[in-house]
């Protein structure tokens, strides 16, 4: 199994890893599939930032349809998801997951069937495509009281037509992003207020 240093990946090696993942597709869960350089902002433009502060971007993974995952820290306490915001910009629709303390482990992949519920077997809805965003070692409630108020959202945007939380139990959170098709998506990790940003590209 190939493991790369999280913060000090050499640009050439990271690029080769990205090309390999794009060529092979499939499950990249074992690879820590980060395509990063010493300056993760250099491949982004001002339009990509949207409402984000570019100085807080610590990692960027470019547009792809491949499964992406990051293992949680084995000794970490569950991270707390405190807010979820949705926005649309020129060229992409955006969901921002904000955590109180740190970004936990996560997995993103298009559902091939079902996708809803904590076990992924409940039908996710009628949209043509469903991007599953799952957080491990994470919770979004305080003694059973939800911390995110709007957990079932409907939009009429170019790509994203819904965002729904379908699981928050057993230190696992799962959101389903309903889309018009299985478009490319990208992720950004933000420091400061820890956030995972998920952008869905417009067709």
Image: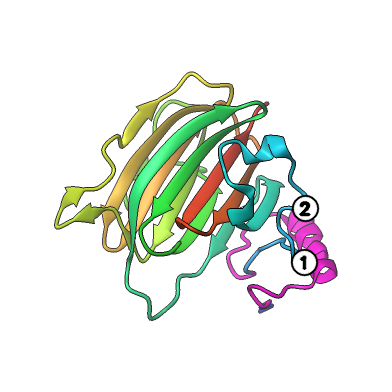
Between discs 2 and 1, the one toward the N terminus: 1
Give the residue number, with chain letter if any, for mark 2: 42
Q: Which residue occupies 38% across, 50% down? A: 174
In this figure, what is the number of numbered marks?
A: 2
Q: How is the image coloured?
A: rainbow
What range of the chain is rendered magenta?
Answer: 4-31
Q: Nearer the viewer, residue 186 or 37?
A: 37
Residue 161's place in the image compared with 61, above or below, is: above
Q: Is residue 90 above or below residue 74?
A: above
The mark lying in front, picked from 2 and 1, is: 2
* Gap in angstroms between the C-alphas marked 2 and 1: 14 Å
**Callout 1: few (<14), some (14-19), or many (20+) C-alpha neighbours within 10 Å?**
some
Asked whether residue 115 appears in the rendered view, the answer is: no
At 36% across and 29% down in the image, what residue appears? 153
Residue at position x 66%, y 79% from top?
1
Q: Is residue 13 left or right of residue 27?
A: right
Q: Is residue 10 magenta?
A: yes
Q: Residue at x 83, y 65 (%)?
A: 16
Quadrant housing the C terminus: top right
In the visual, does 162 lie left or right of 179? left
Task: Give the class, few, some or many, for how many residues have Cα within 10 Å of label 2's Cα (few <14, many ≥20).
Answer: few
Pick the residue in front: 60 or 22. Answer: 60
Q: Position of residue 117 (x, y in %)?
A: 32, 46
Residue at image mark 1: 14
- Give the secondary structure at mark 1: helix
Where residue 118 appears, as percent x and y from the top left, is 32, 52
Q: Nearer the viewer, residue 75 or 194?
A: 194
Residue 115: image tag: none
């Amino acid at each position: 199994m190939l493991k790369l240093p999280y913060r000090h990946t050499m640009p050439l090696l990271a690029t080769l890893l990205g090309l390999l993942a794009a060529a092979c597709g499939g499950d990249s869960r074992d690879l820590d599939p980060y395509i990063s350089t010493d300056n993760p902002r250099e491949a982004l433009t001002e339009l990509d930032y949207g409402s984000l502060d570019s100085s807080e971007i610590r990692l960027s993974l470019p547009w792809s349809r491949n499964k992406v995952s990051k293992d949680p820290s084995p000794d970490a306490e569950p991270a707390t998801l405190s807010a979820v915001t949705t926005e649309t910009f020129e060229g992409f629709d955006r969901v921002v997951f904000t955590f109180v303390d740190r970004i936990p482990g996560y997995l993103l992949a298009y559902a091939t069937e079902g996708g809803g519920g904590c076990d992924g077997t409940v039908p996710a809805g009628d949209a043509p495509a469903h991007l599953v965003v799952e957080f491990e070692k994470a919770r979004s409630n305080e003694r059973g009281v939800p911390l995110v108020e709007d957990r079932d959202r409907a939009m009429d945007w170019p790509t994203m037509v819904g965002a729904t939380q379908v699981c928050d139990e057993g230190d696992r959170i799962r959101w389903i992003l309903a889309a018009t098709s299985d478009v490319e998506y990208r992720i950004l990790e933000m420091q400061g207020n820890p956030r995972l940003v998920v952008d869905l590209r417009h067709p």
